[in-house]
Image: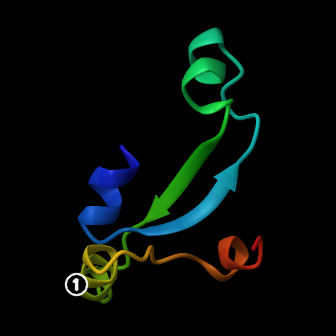
Amino acid sequence: MARFHLDNGARLERLNPLADLSAKGARQSLGLMVNSLYDLDRIEAHDEKFVQGSVAQSRAVAALR
């Protein structure tokens, strides 16, 4: 799902640790879920950034580095 949204111009907005603690969620993503945001004025720029190998992200996500 993430690749679909990011390739369509979404921005990685928020990380939600322990959001899906089901057996399937733990197995597939260690329970981590993300929120993406479509900023209509920036979709093309975000898509181009993704094509070049980078992910558009919120300040909160960038601060996690």
Q: Residue furthest top?
A: 23
> Which class describes the residues within 10 Å of circle 1: few (<14), some (14-19), or many (20+)?
some
| Depicted 31 relative to depicted 41: above or below | above
- Give whichever of 4, 43 is nearer the camera: 4
* Residue at disc 1, secondary structure: helix
Q: Residue furthest front?
A: 53
Snapshot colouring: rainbow
| Front one among 36 and 3 | 3
Q: Quadrant of residue 50?
A: bottom left
Q: Please name the residue shown 40% across and 50% down the image.
A: 2
Front in this rendered view, residue 52 or 59: 52
Q: Is residue 42 above or below residue 39?
A: below
In the rendered image, residue 25, in percent from the top left (x then y), is placed at: 60, 22
Placement of 14 over or under 3, stated as above or below: below
Residue 46 quadrant: bottom left
Residue at the image position 26 percent from the left and 64 percent from the top: 7
Q: Which residue is mark 1?
A: 44
Report the quarter where the C terminus lies: bottom right
Residue type of the residue flagged with mark 1: Glu
